[in-house]
Amino acid sequence: MSEQAQSDGRHLRQSPGKATGEAAGGRETPIGFDAREMTWTLADDPGWRDGRAACALLRTDGVIKPLSVDAAVWGSAFDAIPGAAFPAWIGGHIDLWDDLAELTGYLASAAATGRVPRPYWVVAFTVVEELGVREYLDAHPPETALLHVGEARPPAVDPAWEFLGYDVADAGRLSGLSNCLYAGDEEDAPLVAAFRDRVNAYHLFAALGDADAFRLASDRRVPEHAPFFVFGLFRIAEVAEVAELRP
């Protein structure tokens, strides 16, 4: 870690949270895995310039890097590999891997040729089934559903995985927390005021109750993307040092 990072506390790892697989009010079930880039902070990420952060985030003060199940918010490490040759099938979700072992095996083979830019985190994404998921799956057959549960391997949260926080997103994993613009007017001002201090340095909710309350508010605020769901983010592995990016 650099002396500057040590002195100003800019490191992207908060107090480690350990997974239990049981959220208060529902079971957290893995839906897929990915390698996500850890190159940029909020301050220097080109994707957050031109005022986007002020419109898309509840707050920018104290947020070092927004993380999300939404790949448009937190990009995949594979985005930087033009024409990457993936296996013919990686999973039912377009940009997530069903099988963690297959993902790590691919990363291991790619590392030998330097094809995957570092640093990145290997992460797991879960969904809290009791918070609207079962009703969605009952109403949508597998061939039309955008959200799939029960296909990920391993099928349960590993206690060794580090909990990062909760995101709120629709079935296609568009984040209502970090990718549905806040109008900045009287309509959205109460919502922002109510939730801005409840997100952590990753712009994620640490408490499930806060995430569920925001989920219900998102159903009302962005009805064209409803229903929204609560997704958990877990860090499985860190590849290359990212000390300068940690709060």
Image (tube, rainbow, N blue to C red):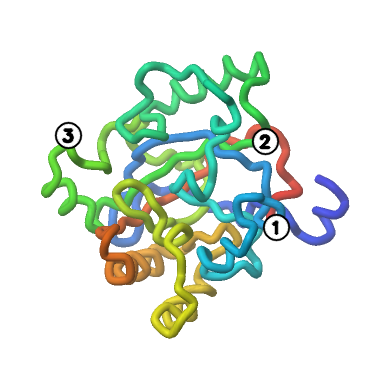
Labels 1 and 3 touching (C-beta < 8 A): no
Residue 141 occupies which quadrant of the picture?
top left
Q: Find disc 1 in the rendering and name its residue.
A: 43
Q: Which residue is mark 3?
A: 143
Mark 3: amino acid: Glu
Label 3 sits on a secondary structure element that is loop
Q: Position of residue 242 (x, y in %)?
A: 71, 42
* Mark closest to the chain's N terminus, 2 or 3: 2
Q: Give the class, few, some or many, for how many residues have Cα within 10 Å of label 2's Cα (few <14, many ≥20).
A: some
Q: Residues within 10 Å of mark 3 (few under 14, many from 20)?
A: few
Q: Residues within 10 Å of mark 1 (few under 14, many from 20)?
A: few
User: Which dot marks residue 141?
Assistant: none
Left/right of residue 20 with respect to residue 74 in the rendered view: left
Q: Quadrant of residue 116?
A: top right
Secondary element under disc 1, as helix, strand or loop, is loop
Q: Nearer the viewer, mark 2 or mark 1?
A: 1
Residue 213 screen position, x and y as percent? 34, 70
Q: Circle 2 sits on which residue?
A: 119
**Which residue is located at x 17 percent, y 34 percent?**
143
Closer to us: 178 or 160:
178
Looking at the image, is 64 positioned above or below residue 60? above
- Front of the two marks 2 and 3: 3
Q: Residue furthest front?
A: 50
Query: In x, y percent, where is residue 39?
Result: 68, 42
Mark-to-mark CA distance, 1 and 3: 41 Å
